Amino acid sequence: MEIEITRVTSKGQVVIPQGIREEAGLREGEKLLVYDLDGTIILKRIKNIDKVKNIDMFEKTFASLWKTAATRGITRKDVAREIEHYRKKKHA
């Protein structure tokens, strides 16, 4: 496993170092899931999310996130509200 250090830009962008992108085969336009797990920001590559047909598989993949959210009292409504707030702020 390769370890590198990167920085967050003033626009909130993060560059994934070239060596890690090459090792992972990460290409331009690929989607990454970003989440905060107790103060640790995690990027998770999402492949073929549009082709996910088995929602149970998707739920199992993110079970730890749902558990953390439930522990913190975060509901799907809370998440939807935050997304809406972000979108309004972004387009303002």
Image (tube, rainbow, N blue to C red):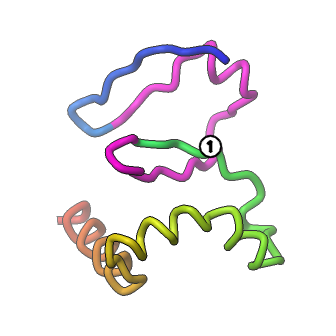
Quadrant in the picture for the N terminus? top right
Residue at x 70% of width, y 19% of height: 22
Range covered by the magenta-colored residues? 13-40
Mark 1 secondary-structure assignment:
loop
Residue 47, how many percent across, how many down? Answer: 74, 52
User: Label 1: few (<14), some or many (≥20) within 10 Å?
Assistant: few
Q: Residue at x 42, y 83 (%)?
A: 76
Residue 7 location (% of width, % of height): 33, 23
For image coordinates 64% across by 45% down, the residue present is 45
Please state which amino acid type lies under the numbered disc 1. Answer: Gly
Above or below: residue 52 compared with residue 18: below
Residue denoted by label 1: 29
- State yes or no: residue 39 in magenta: yes
84 with respect to 17 (left or right): left
Image-quadrant location for residue 28: top right
Image quadrant in which you'd find residue 48: bottom right
